[in-house]
Amino acid sequence: MTNIYEYKTHYRSTEITDRERLLQKAWADFFKKGIVLDGIRPLIVTSWKRSQNYGLVSSVIQAPICSPKVMIKKQEENKEILALIRPFMDDLFDIVKGTDSLIAFSDKDGVVLDLCGDSEIAINAASVNFTIGANMSEKWAGTNSIGLAMEHGKAVQVVGAEHYSTIWHTSHCSSAPIKDPYTDEMIGVITLIGYVRSAHPHSLGLVKTAADTIAKLIERKGIKKETYMLSNFFSAAIDTISDGIMIVNRSGEIVRINKIAAHLLKIPVMENIKWKFSDIEHLRPLSRFFEEAVNGNEVILQNEINLVNEEKYKILFTSRRIMVEGEHLGNILILKKKKHNKEITKLTAKYTFSSLIGEDSEFKRAIKLAAKAAGTDKSVLIIGESGTGKELFAQSIHNESTRQSGPFIAINTAAFPKDLIASELFGYAEGAFTNAVKGGKKGKFEEANGGTIFLDEIGDMPLELQAHLLRVLEEKEVTPVGSSFSKPIDIRILAATNKDLFKLVKENKFRLDLYYRLNVISINIPSLQKRKQDIELLANYFLPTKTLSPGILKYFYEYEWPGNLREMKNVMEQIDIFCDDSIVTEEYLPDYIARQFEDKNWGETLYQSVTNDARRETMVIALNNSKSVVEAANKLGVSSSTFYRWASDYQINIKDYIKKQ
């Protein structure tokens, strides 16, 4: 069998990375031993399990292909959208041409209807049936970016051994759904595919922007494609990609630069000013490499340079010529700060918004607000009881922000001794105190430079330290303990608390000015007790291998869950250990929960029976005459959570009764 992605050109590394090894080991442990490692994203593991349930074989050697009859029908049905998208795909391919990439368009069923790409990868892809007619839906091809984009309705990147089938383990794929601007229904999926060892993190940003632009093209067909590409697609792409992007003319002048590149190169973004590399001392090394890119014969030049500013670090950059009608006008440069391996594993956030599970309206509202907050660089205060998933929200915000390629540092301010927290957060100079490390030590704020710092349990921060934190927020600089000099930093602060900070302000335990600095955007995460409709959903998520009986679910709905999601996860792990049956009954309820119900009389008196029958009948009538649970609950004068609890008590399947819209 010809491997779909053999490595032949000089653009790709032949050395396997630590991340590839981790993914390969995780894949092998899951499929051969049934073990799930912590390093694998939840949406990937969930997709693996679904793929297994479909009866798919992970060692298939070719992608499934539709019959000619089906293909003719699909191409006819999508004739108009194909005519619109094909020129756009060509323009998008021009951006990545020469990087061993494929651009694919799949319809709403996951069937590939059009392809364009570099010849080598196209030939290798065709050898395993990844061609027009390939069905890449999850149900037919297992875990892949096209199938996941269809499943979740959002952009997804799948790398290497995250794929279900081994034939894709040497590829990286980024897909984004294209939605009808009028109905919000999925039209299809746009995908960028390449070799895993030449994968660029900005691929996901490109397809996300591409999908949005195609939707706008559909809405505004009257606009010429070339004009729209220039004024909309590129402008949007340059500001949303997580890498540094800049356009340089042949004279070495920077004519366009995004915020990420400006931050990496330590230069201000100013309109009507064209910086030249040779005019800025610490950018002169880049000037020499740019001259090679302009004057050399290679269309694409990749290299690594050392920049010396306040700190030494390496920049990975890719340069590509901009050609218009055969004339070389300048170059587009893609920049990325190189990280050490230990930083990558230690300082990254692994959760995204797709990791947050729940259908409760307040919970979904919190996710929606957090997603909007992610698009800004404002401070966010996340409020919720212990165990509700505040850090999951913080990580998701970071991973959807422009700082996603930077570090994510999480600090529990309540976990440090009072006399050590200042040095841990802000670092210290040499000789600052006894046993101080020679040369001093960076604090967490410096480690988070260029990224996000998450301060959990901010309400427990000592009052005297709050003044120091306020200065950091206002001055954008940090002063190590024992030092007279400040260091500039570029960080975003996310904070979380399970306390009423405004009450602490009134008690003089929290600074009012710091409260307003942190509380620019506030997000409230509801407790599990208030998310009754999510009880069964979450229980099944934490215990997917067993079925929960109505009896034990009754206890779960009645229990208050003071430890929230963390407690539920622990309870499900205990049940999984002790219950050998496929159905979990009340006898496996943890003792400390069961004891709370010992004094309750679960039997019904005649009066209770009549009352309950009447209530059940009233609920059914309300559902039959309502378009939503909220509407039905309002008619009965109760909250939605109470309505869901009653529905569980009386074993009412809401979907069977609710009025169709």
Image: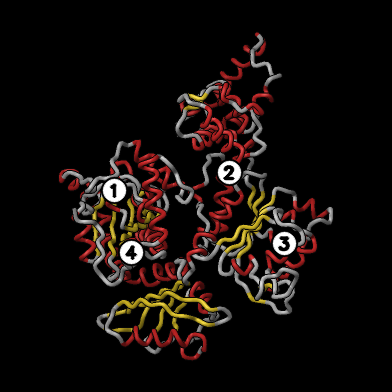
Which mark identifies residue 222? 4
Residue drawn 68% across the image and 64% down it: 424
**Residue on which the image places disc 3:** 421
Q: Is residue 430 above or below residue 163?
A: below
Neighbours of disc 3 within 10 Å: few (<14), some (14-19), many (20+): some
Q: Earlier in the sequence, mark 3 or mark 2?
A: 2
- Residue at far top of view: 606
Kind of residue at badge 1: Met
CB-based contact (under 8 Å), mark 2 and mark 4: no
Kind of residue at badge 3: Ile
- From the viewer's perspective, is the residue at label 2 or at label 4 nearer? 2
CB-based contact (under 8 Å), mark 1 and mark 2: no
Q: Secondary structure at mark 3?
A: helix
**Residue on which the image places disc 2:** 363
- Visible in this render: residue 219? no
Q: Earlier in the sequence, mark 1 or mark 3?
A: 1
Kind of residue at badge 4: Gly
Q: Nearer the viewer, residue 446 or 423?
A: 423
Estimate the spatial distance between the alpha carbons at disc 3 and disc 2, rounded to whole Å. 33 Å
Q: Secondary structure at mark 2?
A: helix
Quarter of the figure that contains the C terminus = top left
Q: Earlier in the sequence, mark 4 or mark 3?
A: 4
- From the viewer's perspective, is the residue at label 1 or at label 3 nearer? 3
Q: Nearer the viewer, residue 25 or 82?
A: 25
Q: Earlier in the sequence, mark 2 or mark 4?
A: 4
Estimate the spatial distance between the alpha carbons at disc 1 and disc 3, rounded to whole Å. 51 Å
